[in-house]
Image (cartoon, grey):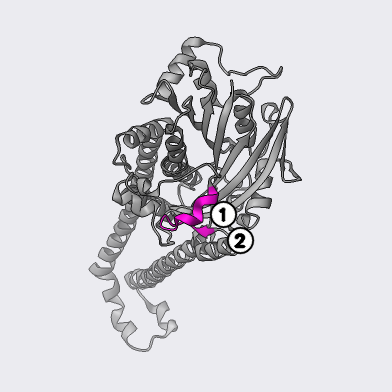
Amino acid sequence: MQSVESHYIFYYPFNYRQFHFKELTETLNKNHFYHFRIKQEKMHEALYGPDVQINYQLLEQFYFPFIEEKLLNDRVSLVHFNRFSKDIGETGHMQTKFCNIKFTLHSADINLCPFGIGIIALRIQLHDVPDVTTALSFAHFFRVLLPKIDEELGAQLFLGELPYQHTEQLILEKIAPFLSYFFIDYQRQKASASKMPFFEDERMYVSGFMQVDPTIVLTDELLYRAGQLNGYDETGAAYISSTNPDYIRAFVDEHLYMRWMPDFAIMTTLQSHMQLTTIQDARLDKYLCNFHSISYYNVLIHYFYKMMLLKLAFEHSELKFSKDKDIVEELIEQITKFASRYYFSEVSVRTEGKEMAQFFRKTFRIDAQYREIKETLDELYRIQEDRSTDRLNELIFILTVFSMISGIYGMNLVIDKLDKPFEFSNVWSFTFFEWVAFLLTIVGLAISILLVGNQIRNLLTSYIERKRRARSQ
C-alpha cells in the first residue's frame, strides 16, 4: 500500500476565561496569530501547504446564512467563532519502534468559540510515508497528549532539532506557550479535577485525508482501521482492533459515508473523521480543498457542540444541590442561548453537508446528550423551585398566624404605652396578656429585621458569587 498524500488536522479543545477575552485576543496578535478573514485570501496560502488551493467562494456558499454569520464573521466577538491562524512551516519527525515518520507542521489555528470553548487545530502533512499503516500509526501516537498506558507509549517526537516528550508539551511550550494562563482552573473548584475534566481520555480528535495507491481496494478492514486509527501491533504487523468480521462490517456500515464510493470514502467515528481515496486525476485537488475548508468547519462546529454539551454535563454534575440555585439558573440560561443561537439540526444548504451533519450528530451523540442535559437541568430547577415554594409557604404560614394573634388582641394592649417615652420599669406592672402582647411585638420586630437582613445578605452573596464566577470563566 502506497500513501501518496497524507494530511492531518488535530483538534485540541480547551476552556478559556471569557472575562479575559480581550486580553487573550491581544496576546494572540502579539504572538503572530492573525484573525482569519476569508476576504484576505492571499494571507492564507501558506497555511495548508504548497499543493493546496482553497476555494473560499465555495465555502461561503456551503452554509446557511445564520451559521455563516457565526463561523465566517469578520468581527472578533464572544458570540462568534473567532479563528486566529499562524503559519509555522517547520519540519519534524516521529520515531517509533518500527518507523521514522517525517512531517511538516504547516500551521496552527486557535479558534475562540462561544461559551469559553476553545479549539486548537494543527495542520500536518506527512512525507515519504510507505503505507497506510505508517500514516495511521502517526495519528495514533500524535493525538495522545500525555501518554500513560502501554498502547500510547513508544513514540518520540521532534520538531526541528528539539525533542518533545509528548504532544501537549509541543502545543503548550512551542505553539502557544501563553495559552495556559487563560485556562479555567477547575482544580480550584475540585481538587481531583483535571485541567479540562470534560475532555474525553485526553486524546485529540483527528481529521485525515489520505490518497492511497489506485490498486488498493477500500475494503471494510481498511476502512475500519482508518476509523479506529489502528497502526502497528507489537510485532510490527498491521493492527486491527477487532477479530470479528461481522462486527467490522456492521461498524463500517454505521460510520461510512459512501456517496462517492468505491474510490472515495469518509469514515466518521469517535476518534477520527478520515477521508480515503484512490483518485489520481484532477478531482483530487477538489477533495483536498474541501478537506481543508468545508470539512474543517464541519468538524469544528460539531466538535464545538460536543465539547459544549460535555462542559454543561460536567458543571451540573458538580452542583451542590441545596446551595447552587443561581448556578442552575445560569446553566439553564447557557443551554437556552446555545440552543437558540448555535444548535441547529442543519448547518449546510448542500445535500452532502446535511448528510455529514447527521453522521456527526449520531457519532458524537449530540442530540441525545442535549436532551439529557436539558431534562436534567429543568428537573433540577423544578425541584429547587418546589423547595423554595415550600419554604416560602411555611414562612407565610408562620407570619400569618403571628399577624392574626397580634392583630386580634396583642399589640393593641400595649400600643398606647409604646407611643410615649417607654420606661422598662413599667414592664413589671404588665398583666399576663400585656406580657404576651409585648413579647409578640418584640419578636415580630426581630423576625422582620432578621428576614430583611437575610434577604440583603443573600442578594449580596449572590452578586459577589456571580462576579467571582464571571472572572473565573
Q: Position of residue 462 (x, y in %)?
A: 45, 63
Residue designated by label 1: 86
Q: Position of residue 344 (x, y in %)?
A: 32, 43
Tag on residue 31?
2
Instruction: Specify whether residue 44 is painted magenta.
Output: yes
Boundaries of the magenta span:
34-47
Q: Residue at x 43, y 23 (%)?
A: 263
| Element assignment for label 2 | loop
- Quadrant in the picture for residue 153: top right
Labels 1 & 2 near each other (Cβ < 8 A): yes
**Mark 1 or 2, nearer chain start:** 2
Measure the alpha-carbon separation of dots 1 and 2. 9 Å
Q: Position of residue 449 (x, y in %)?
A: 40, 71
Between 32 and 247, the residue placed more toward the observer is 32
- Quadrant in the picture for residue 286: top left
Between 376 and 65, the residue placed more toward the observer is 65
Q: Position of residue 106 (x, y in %)?
A: 59, 46
Residue type for callout 2 = Asn
Residue 110 in the figure: left or right of residue 89: left
Instruction: Specify whether residue 168 is painted magenta.
Output: no
Q: Residues within 10 Å of mark 2 (few under 14, many from 20)?
A: some
Asked if 423 appears above or below 39 in the picture, the reply is: below
Tag on residue 468?
none
Residue type for callout 1 = Lys
Between 280 and 306, the residue placed more toward the observer is 280
Q: Residues within 10 Å of mark 1 (few under 14, many from 20)?
A: many
